[in-house]
Image (spheres, grey):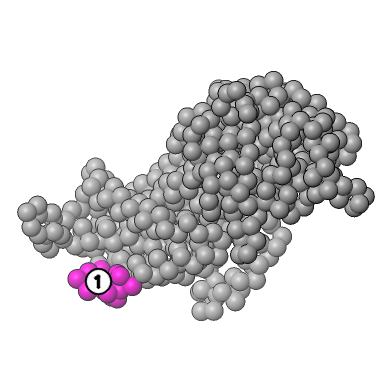
Amino acid sequence: MNPSQPLLSVRGIVKRYGGLAASDGVDLDVATGEIHSIIGPNGAGKTTLVGQLSGEIRPDAGQILFDGRDITTVPTYRRSALGLARSFQVTSIFPRLTVLENVALAVQAHAGHSFVFWRPAAEEERLREPAREALARTGLERHASSIAATLAHGEQRRLEVAMAIATEPRLVLLDEPTAGMGPEETRQMVDLLHDLRRDTTILLVEHDMDVVFALSDRISVLVYGRVIATGSPEAIRANADVRDAYLGEEYADG
Amino acid sequence: MPKITPGTLGAVAAVALLLALPPILDLVGAPFYVDVATRIAIFAIAAVALDLVLGYGGMVSFGHAAFIGVGAYTVGILSTHASNGTLLFDGALPIGGTHSALIAWPLAVLASALVAFFIGLVSLRTRGVYFIMITLAFAQMIYFFFVSLETYGGDDGLSLWERSSLLGLDLYDSTVFYYLVIFILIAVLVFCRRLVGARFGRVIVGARENERRMNAIGFPTYRYKLVCFTISGAIAGLAGALLANQTEFVSPSLLHWTRSGELIVMVVLGGMGTLLGPVVGAIFFLLLEDVLSELTQHWMIIFGPLLILVVLFANRGLLGLLRRGTGNDTR
């Protein structure tokens, strides 16, 4: 057990779709400061879990605690205000806005209300300065004034991360940040996540096992809507159940 | 100092042209066209209002004529009571009518804002086609409400005995009324321009582009869209108040669903999400309607194909076409 209270604590959440339990009593603890990865075969319920953590899907049963507070029924936008940010598996940006505008919007969401009708947002340094910082951290400052849709795939994935960290979250939920990336782009993303861990906790849902084992402090394995094992990368590698259920299967698939 | 760009020059030229229009029309011996220009400017105000929700917010409201109607009827009803000296509400706190623009017009804006707020409250829970259908359904309800409102003329409508009075201006003078409407149109344009560039506008555009992402980064988009819809309805109501004064007549036909469709056509034709585009759209639509309907009663047969051509070949509307033509394509 953790000596201190976990930052995120999932207690027995259940989500059923008809007869299928996509989450079948998921338990998960994410400690402050760690990179915690969730792995599992396709159909294990990762997407459903992410949906429930971000607030887009409401669990049928169970509890989600963030920093000790029950957020099970808290809407998405308020979870963001509490410090829970996310990126999306399928790139989700504002394609027709500039890269800087994309990130500035994320900053704006956390810089007071937006019922401001007269003062131009483009002149608010309070929005643009933190946005530029987030772009610098993600290596996108060169593209600040490009239209987001024109970025390369890997750059758009990093823009996703930039938007997440611009909200100064305490926990970032990254849903397959390396999806569809080539080796070079993947390496850049791993470097970026290494850098991020200095000031935020990361919950990583990832398919690329090299990425998972290179970054994770702990790994939880999700199979058929349940966490069958949680532990250090070494422990997970050595775990016979995990090999049977997942790592072995991948082997067979390959 | 603001930079002097082709855009600024264009704006200055356009304003100068608008201001010089009445004397020019006088000069060419067609002073009655001032009334046509006024009518166009009034619809331009409503089209700009619709552009806020349609162009910037991506919310296809098929019920904006209802807000024009509510604004017009507010002025009409208040004016009727003032003219025949009856009370609007009888009771502990009797309220009479008024001809004063400073009271009636803000009330028209308030009434249409309220109606827009409650329609938005329900319809903004839906998306896409459902949103279109629900706004249409609400507008139809309001249409039939006024049709069955026998006290105020029902189907036949309501004639205003007097135009509103405003600070000693002679609103019966076509030129004075024209300048007043142009002043309001410009004020509305400036307000909307600031609004879309401010934080509020960014949220509205963000919700159009990717609402799911907006929620994820922490915006309660629903309430911003609701405020946007309400502001838009309020401005449309102001247009209604002006229209009632110009025609000195209000009737349910103002709220007919085809009117809502015409407003959408003006916005799309002129260029969505540009504010100036809907003004161009209103000019083009109403002038063409005027000219073509003199040729044939079935003027839509000519207008329809024209509309299709614009939508197919000028995806940023007539304004985009104009800007390309003058080498002033800013985006």
Q: Depth check: B331 or B288 in front? A: B331
Q: Which residue is mark 1?
A: B149
Q: Residue at x 61, y 64 (%)?
A: A18
Q: Position of residue A174 (x, y in %)?
A: 70, 37
At 42% from the left and 58% from the top, the residue drawn is B122
Q: Is residue B143 magenta?
A: no
In this view, the residue farthest toward the left is: B92
Vertical comparison of B239 with A212: above or below? below
- Which segment did they paint magenta? B144-158
Residue beneath the point at 64% across and 32% down:
A30
Q: Residue furthest top?
A: A198
In this rendering, position of residue A150 left or right of residue A15: right
In the displayed structure image, the side of residue A187 where residue A202 appears, left or right:
left
Residue type beneath disc 1: Leu
Q: Is residue B13 above or below residue B55?
A: above
Where residue A254 appears, as percent x and y from the top left, is 93, 50
Which element type, helix, strand or loop, lies under badge 1? loop
Can you give x and y, in whole percent of width and height, for residue B3 in the image? 60, 27
- Location of the N terminus of chain A by quadrant is top right
Which residue is painted at 9% across and 52% down in the image?
B93
Quadrant for residue B102, please give it: top left
Tag 1, which chain? B
Can I make out residue A220 in this image? yes
Left or right: residue B167 compared with residue B16:
left
Tell me, yes or no, if residue B30 can be seen here.
no
B245 or B46: nearer the viewer: B46
